[in-house]
Amino acid sequence: MAELISSRGNPLVGHFKKLAASRAYREESGEFPGDGRKLLQEAVRWGAEVKTVLYTGDVPPEVPGARLVQVTESVMQAASRMDTPQDVLFSCRLPKQGLPDPLPAQFVVLDGVQDPGNVGTILRTADAMDCDVLVLPGCADLFSPKTVRAAMGVHFRRALRRCSLEELSARTKAEHIPLYATALREDTVDLRKVALNRAAVVIGSEGRGISPEVMACCTAALKIPMSPRCESLNAAAAATIVLWEMARAAGHIE
């Protein structure tokens, strides 16, 4: 029989509130939150380690090894921090996020992309194109509730990576993977004229673009062809075009 919690002051409620609010607490506790039955189904389907499930209404499908806790709607409201919470809230074990050895042949690097919706959308698009994403410091947290929600289950289907610029630069040089920037400078070339079957491409923030430190590590800059009336693209839109070209170069799509 599942536990029942009816008090908003229960420590488990505080635990979920802090998971949603604090990156430091997520890393300290080794857990991150997700919400909704569909996302929970994705977590179970792809073998994520689900720690705790809070629910109102019907009991969720079996979740191996998880602690099931029935809560009142008032408690769910307090735990989820959403204006209109779903009827399931759960936590999963935070996975390791270091670089693989060797690096993937193709991947996109995010530099200063701080909007969690953009980061989640890029993760989702990369998954659709069967490509990897690497996140540098200064981006939105990969495991914040908004990022997890926008990524629609990618957190359970793919390994997510983050590292320092120094590590990225050293590894791409050692493994002979060219690092390109999506930016305008003297050596900018058309995206369509570069071999992307083995490459890493940096996407910067809309506000400040790619940082000078990252730009200095790049082999060359790439330009996405567009109308001269347009100055730039949203980070997620730019990443989508780059990812599609990468998938085409790798033969993942025709």
Image (cartoon, rainbow, N blue to C red):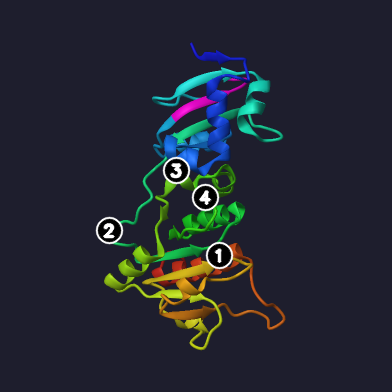
Give the SS element for disc 4: loop
Residue type beneath disc 1: Thr
Between the residue at mark 3 and the residue at mark 1, the CA separation in whole angstroms equals 21 Å
Instruction: Identify which residue is drawn at 67% across, 77% down.
Output: 231
- In the image, 192: left or right of 206? left
4 or 1: mark nearer the eye? 4
Q: Position of residue 237 (x, y in %)?
A: 60, 65
Position above or below: 19 against 136: above
Q: Which residue is mark 1?
A: 240
Give the SS element for disc 2: loop
Instruction: Identify which residue is drawn at 50% across, 74% down.
Output: 212
Residue type beneath disc 2: Asp
2 or 1: mark nearer the eye? 2
Position above or below: 251 against 96: below
The answer to which of marks 2 and 1 sits earlier in the sequence is 2
The answer to which of marks 3 and 4 sits earlier in the sequence is 4
Magenta part of the chain: 51-58
Q: Which residue is mark 4?
A: 141
Q: Which residue is mark 2?
A: 101
Between the residue at mark 2 and the residue at mark 1, the CA separation in whole angstroms equals 26 Å
Q: Which residue is mark 3?
A: 156
Q: Position of residue 224 (x, y in %)?
A: 57, 77
